[in-house]
Amino acid sequence: MIYLENITKIYDKSKKKALDNISVHIKPKEFVIFVGLSGAGKSTLTKLITREEQPTSGKIVVGGIDYAKLKKRDIPYLRRKIGVVFQDFKLLPKKTIYENIAYALEVAGISGKTIRQRVPQILKMVGLENKKDDFPKMLSGGEMQRVAIARALVHEPKILIADEPTGNLDPKNAWEIIDLLLKVNEYGTTVILTTHNREIVNTLKKRVITLRNGKLIKDQEVGRYALQ
Amino acid sequence: MMFTTLYRLIKTGFKNFLRNGWLSIASTIIMTLTLFIISIFLIGNIVLSQGIQTIQDKIDISVYLNDNVPGQTVLDMQKELSDNQNVKIVRYVSKDEAKQKYEEKFASNKQLKESLDDSGGNPLPASLEIKTYDPNKISSLLPIFNENKYKPIVRKVSYQENKDTIDRLVKFTQFIRTVGWSVAALLIITSLIIIYNTIRTAIYTHKDEIEIMKLVGANPWFIKGPFLVEGIMYGVFGTVASLAALYVMLRLLVNFLNGYFGTGNIGNGVFGFLLQNLGTLIILLLATGIIIGGTSSTVAIRKYLKKS
């Protein structure tokens, strides 16, 4: 599903290696956790997969698409196959929950009929069908993150990237989000979770890839939190 | 899908326009001013060109003849003139015809008419009216009138007045053109800059939305389109507003002129002329407005949405 080969990323400004010769292979339907402190390179890695950034050197192939050969005009289609959620949710405050999710379909040119079918389905899946007319500020952090996940899933992507999705949440809400991600994974979506929450990593017993200062220091099939 | 996308991005562009508030108004005003000035110079230009044409179509040379000259000599001169390459038409105007014309011309002016009657008989000379192909080469004809056989019959040759008027009009038109296009160019540049900044602000205001659009794989046109629509909208609104302003200005001008000259028929001419050329004017203004607005937004979009 995702091949990263000898990836090095140096940002123009800092001249520092954000990623240093990283190679990772993620299989379809896998649940992978990237662990690392801030600045370890987790976000850079996810940005490379969503093609927001390009590697300084190395090869990226996702879903059979070689990023080196990817044309600029095909990037939007790629993004519809990769859902992304962030710590700060990135919802539009002036749109209702329903509109926030419908928006992702609208801007892709999906017909109104399809939108009216698909949005209620996805709202039901994340358990927010009662809040569809609320605005984001009326929701709790956990609920906002569920809206973000719903939006990320609305294109039925093959991959879901959750970049520190529980960073702003209390433990109860955090676990609700993790449960939702596990459910999404069960339905067959490859899930990439980045976190530095020790409890979550140790409880999940999933594959854990640990990064430190841009280097891959551990890749375990059933991993534990290994940072001090 | 094409239609849905088009509808959505026009809707979004319209919303942006409304949300931009004062910036939208400023952009519309400068666009209106630009198009208004351009239309005034366009109309002025056409009016002046037509004026010049009308004067040029008039008689280039009038050769006034002495009374009681031999008819054969007049015919000879008429033939010699007709044979000249530069001469289009030579027409003989008899004394009676000259009087008739004079009376027609001053029909409304009793005093002038009576002065002719009072003189007893007909003081107006017969003449040859000459129309040339190139009024600038009139001087080549002058030697003919100085030939010995024709000298006795020629009373006066009149040509200079028209030429001077035309020269002055041409110079004036050129001056108006230079000033007009300089002012228009300056306003076009100002419009470009102001609209560019408005669109840039609009992009900045929507940066969260744009980020999310990119994130969820929006069609690139859905990101750029609304800003282009907004830019084009300034052109469309500017055209409508400038035409309205033009109409109001001409109304006031015509009312003033009608009052000044005590007639009511100046308006018909002006508005008839405007109506005749309205289609062309609208197309020209719309094209100019859309090009200005479209260019500004395209540059702003290119510069601020470069990264995908």
Image: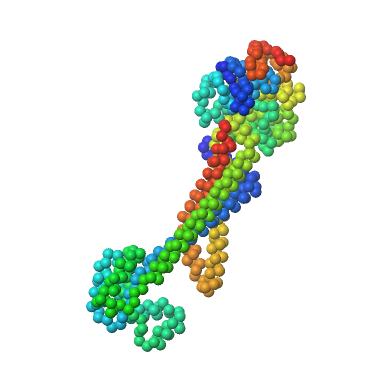
Tell me residue B168's x, y (percent): 44, 65
Q: Foreground: B64 or B188?
A: B64
Quick one: which residue is furthest to the top in this view?
A221
Q: Quadrant of the N terminus of chain A?
A: top right
Residue A143 in view (yes/no)? yes
Tag count:
0
Q: Foreground: B43 or A150?
A: B43
- Residue at image coords 56%, 42%: B297
Q: Is residue B248 left or right of residue B61?
A: right
Residue A203 in view (yes/no)? no
Q: Is residue B169 left or right of residue B63?
A: right
Q: Quadrant of the C terminus of chain A?
A: top right
- Residue at image coords 27%, 67%: B84
Image height check: is A193 above or below B150? above
Image-quadrant location for residue A46? top right
Image-quadrant location for residue B155? bottom left
Image height check: is B47 above or below B120? above
Q: Foreground: A8 or A25?
A: A8
- Residue at image coords 62%, 32%: B212
Q: Foreground: A202 or B94?
A: B94
Tell me residue B96's x, y (percent): 33, 81
Give the image's coloring scheme.
Answer: rainbow
Image height check: is B21 above or below B263? above
Tell me residue A211's x, y (percent): 66, 17
Tell me residue B248's x, y (percent): 56, 61
